[in-house]
Structures are given as C-alpha cells and as structure tokens.
Amino acid sequence: MATPAHPTPKPTADQRSQYPQQLARALGMLENILITLSAVTPASSVFIIIPAILLAAGGASVSVLALAAVASVFVGFCYAELATAYPIAGGEYTWAARLLGRSSGFALFVLTLVNGVLIISVIALGTGDYLSVAIPSLGGKWVGVAVIAVTTVVALLNIKANAWVTGVFLCVEVSAIAVPVGLGAAHPERGPSAFVHAQTAAPNGLADIGFGGLATLIPVALFAYNGYGAAVYYAEETRNATRTIGRVIMICLAATVAIEVLPLAAVVAGAPSLTDLLHSDAPLNYFLTARGGSAVNTAVSVGIAIAIVNAVIAIILQIARLLFASARDRSWPDPIDRALGSVHPRLHTPVVSTIVVGLFAVLAAALLPMRWLIVATGAGLVLVYLFVALAALRIRAARRGIAGGYRMPLWPLPPAIVIGVMLYSAYNLARDDWQQIAFAVAAMVAGYAYYARSTFTLAAASAGRCPTRSTRNSETPVAPSSTRPGFGPRGYFVGAGVKGSLMVVKYWTAAAIATGAVTRIMPPTAPSAPMAAAPARQPTTAPGRKKNRPPIMPVASETPEPTAMPPSAQPTAAPPMPPTRVPMVAPMAMVSFMRFQAACSRS
C-alpha cells in the first residue's frame, strides 16, 4: 500500500505577513561602519562646518564640539534602540510610521526624500571648488553634475563592493584630516587653556563672547556629527543586524567625534597667530598654508574632493534604499511600485531606485540655484531628529513586556533632551532664516496632505462619489497583495501639495474613518512579533481598487538571531521617505557660516 504523500503545509499568517528577503545580507559590522562613516563625511565637516564654529568661538570651539558630542550621545541612544527594534532599510520614517502613526511616517518620508536628493546635489557641487585648487579647469557646476552621474553608476554595484570602494576613499579622507593634526602637534603655540577661551574676530583684534553665544553653536556642531544613524539604512544587508546595528551606530558616533575634534584642537593649538586665524575667510586653509606650505594645502584640498565623492556614493546608496522601501510599502501606482521595488537578481541592489535618485540629483544640481538648494536643505535635519526623539519616547510602550534587545540608559531623559535641543534649534532657524524651517515644515505638510487625500479618495470611491481610475488599478498587483504591508490607499499619483493645515488633514482622516470606509490606523505594535495580516473587508473595496492593506510588517531574515526579536520578526518596511545627513554637512555649513559671519561683523 502506497504511503500517502504529505501535503505541503500552508504558510502561516506570520510567514505571509513578512517581507521577503530581497537584499543580500552581505555586510558585516566593518563594512557597515565603512559606508556609514563615508556618509558622515568627517572631512567635509572639518573643512566646511567646523570653520564656521571656529570663526564664531575661537579656541572655545573645541569646547563647543565636546558639549555637542555629549548631546550626540543622547541622539545616538535614540537611534540605537529604535534601530535594534526596527532594523529596516527605510530608516527614520519607518520608526515614525510604527510609533507615531502612518501619516506621520509618510510625512517624514517626503521630507527625508526631498532633503536627501537635494543634499546630494549640494555636496557634489562643492567638488569643483576643491579640485580647482590643484587643476583650475576642473572648477564649476558641471564637475559636480559629472560626479553625481559617475557615483550613481558606482552605487549600482553590489553592496559589499560599495563598502570597500567607500572604505578606500575613507582612508584617503582620514589621511587628509591627519595632516592638520600632525602639523599642529609639531608646532604647538598654546596649551589646553585656549580651548575654553571664547573669542571672535573684531575690527581691532579679537573680542570675547559669552556663554550664550557658545550655546547657539551647539546645534551647528550636532549637525557636523550627523550621519552615524545612517547605519540602519543598510540593516537588511547586514548580518545579525538585530544584535549589531546599535553597536555600529555608537562606534560610528565615537569615530566621528574623534576624527572631527582632533584636527580642530590641533589648529587652535598650533596656529601661528590666533588673530590671523580668526580673521581669515578659510581658517583651515590658512593654517595648512602657514604651517605646511601651498603644496600641502593643495594636496589636502584634493583629499577633500575625494571625500566629497565618497559621501555622494554613500548618500545615493542610502536614499536609494529609502525609495526602495517606499515602493515595497506600495506608496505609488502599481507600475512605479514594481519598478522602484525591484532588485537586480545578480547584484541584489535596487537598481531602478538608485538610477532615479541619481537622475533627480543631477537635475537639481544642473537646474536649481545654490541658494535655493541651501534653503531647501537647511532645516530638514531638525525635524528628522525631533521625530526620532518622539518615536523614542514611544518605543518602551511598544516593547512593554518584551525582554532582551538594546535599551538606552536613563530613558526617557535622552529623547527629552534631544527634543529640547531640536526645538531650540528650530527657534534659532525661524528667527534667523525662516525660509529654511518653512520649507521643511511645508514638505511634511505636503506629506500629510498627500496621505490624507489618498485616504479620503478611497473613502469617496467606496461610497460611489468619485471615479476609481480602474484602468490603472486593473493591472495585476504584485502578489500577494492581500498580505503585503503598506501605508494604505495611494489615491492619485499627482501629489496633493500643501493644501491645508494639519487640522484639515486630521479632519479628512477622521471623516474617512467615521464613514467606516477605511481601516482605522492600527496602534503601535510590539516589535518582537510580526503583526498578523488585517482581515479582508470585501464590501469596503471599490471596483478596481485593492483591499485595505494590513499594517506595516517585518522583514524576513536569513539566519536566526538569539535576541528577544528574532530576525524572522525584524520589521522591514514602513511608509515612504532619508538625508541623512542624509548628511546635512554642506547645507548646514554654508548657512551657519553665513549666519556667524554676519554675527561677527556686527560685533
């Protein structure tokens, strides 16, 4: 008698609700650190942002960076715990979607995406300024455009190859930073007491400044360190991410602080004249020329140009994964979702998303004036940090009763401190250059409005009050649509724009929920176990539209990890939207430099 064949077991609800592992887990801790530090681009911070702090505070700029390092530890705590709970390629917006609401996650996605693309343009446009020191013909805007095009091609390689490419460039970058450190150590002119003496340039020499002036510089120094949290964007490509991603973030923070503070201290201690240093438009270049000669200054300038190229590669990788995560969350029409969410079968990279990011960065660099780019990217990081801290305040409620996993010390003090610092930074930006903070707020309001309009459109379609655009939605969805995570209804592809205040957005969402036509936004769920797919609600689905989508789900992992949240429960996608620093180095540097230069002239 033949033995009956065992039927193939059906997938469980947990298995159906997880993302497939599309990206290759090819990175170890070291490779993730190399890419993350490349996105931080400490050399750019040393030669762009830190000179602004140095001109405003003199020798006390070292103390300002030290205080900012303490504050950055609190930001790092927030990133480490959130990244350990949700190691997802989408980064910050995925945390906001799970802990602050999916509409907030989508709004943060819009802000991060816009800032990330424009920051690539701003940073790349600075390449010609440094290359022209060695080769004058290589200056100008089109050098930056060419850098974006070439680095986009490099970013198409598999993630491990990119890790080592950026690692080699990072070694050149650190070597360039080591030059002022060595020159300062070889020619000491003053001791550590100079690091607490706050002075700035005055018409007749130097003038002392008070603690209040130093306090205004701490947010600027925070931006100089920014970028260590970008490690989470590569979490789905990092082995044992749940256990290691928090350590990667804190290691990158420690390395960033050391790489940026040491050259500043060496310049302050070894400058031939502190008065000449603070009266120079480019204090780092003055120091290099005075102590090492023009040849050294030229060589270091070329090293900084290489550092910029390295940063562009790393940020393109970061924002491409942000865009890939948004498509996986079904934020766009079906054809666009399939294209942006596709992964090359051999390279295991989101090729289409990478090309789209590079293309838009090229267009922004070629067509938009630098002043517009600065305004558009000057305040985005303030809101990103603010939402990260708010999410960190909610993380313990989501993880209540779950043992294991990294937990920040002194909670809720670290996120509370970050919120206070970011509100203070927003106040300073609104007072000194309201256009920057207005653009960042407008980007988020546009995200809220787009999300609300999408929800409202489906509610109206379900009630038979508006067309359903069945031609577009009749296409075969990426299977299985009933168990794929997403933000909810997409509505029209054309963005709603800034069409109302947040109160209007809340009213629209409340009205849609009140009609019963859409699923109520799910409350935050513990990260240790995957959410079950929401039950189908056939009667609420209009003809030509997909079913209401379940909450955002976790990512499947290749190998189990001995933690409270196994890799199989690692979340992987959230609502669309990265700079990371998305590095805010270049825009914040230029804005800060202009602001403090004006302050110096007034004094």
Image (cartoon, rainbow, N blue to C red):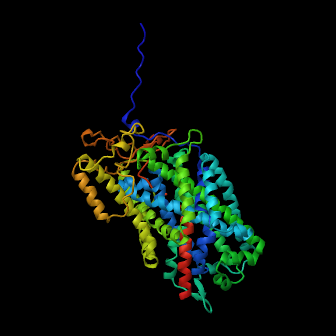
Residue 449 horizontal/vertical position (percent): 34, 59
Specify whether residue 571 is in view: no
Which quarter of the rendering shows the C terminus? bottom right
The residue that appears at 42% across and 40% down in the rendered structure is 18
Residue 441 horizontal/vertical position (percent): 40, 67
The residue that appears at 56% across and 71% down in the rendered structure is 589
Specify whether residue 546 is in view: yes
Residue 450 horizontal/vertical position (percent): 36, 57
- 211 or 97, which lies in front? 97
Q: As displayed, is residue 600 above or below residue 259? A: below
Q: Is residue 500 left or right of residue 477?
A: left
Q: Residue furthest bottom?
A: 204
Tag count = 0
Q: As displayed, is residue 370 above or below residue 166? A: below
Which quarter of the rendering shows the N terminus? top left
Q: As displayed, is residue 598 above or below residue 266? A: below
- 173 or 222, which lies in front? 173
Query: In the figure, residue 59 lies in which quadrant?
Result: bottom right
Query: In the figure, residue 501 lies in which quadrant?
Result: bottom left
Residue 304 horizontal/vertical position (percent): 67, 65
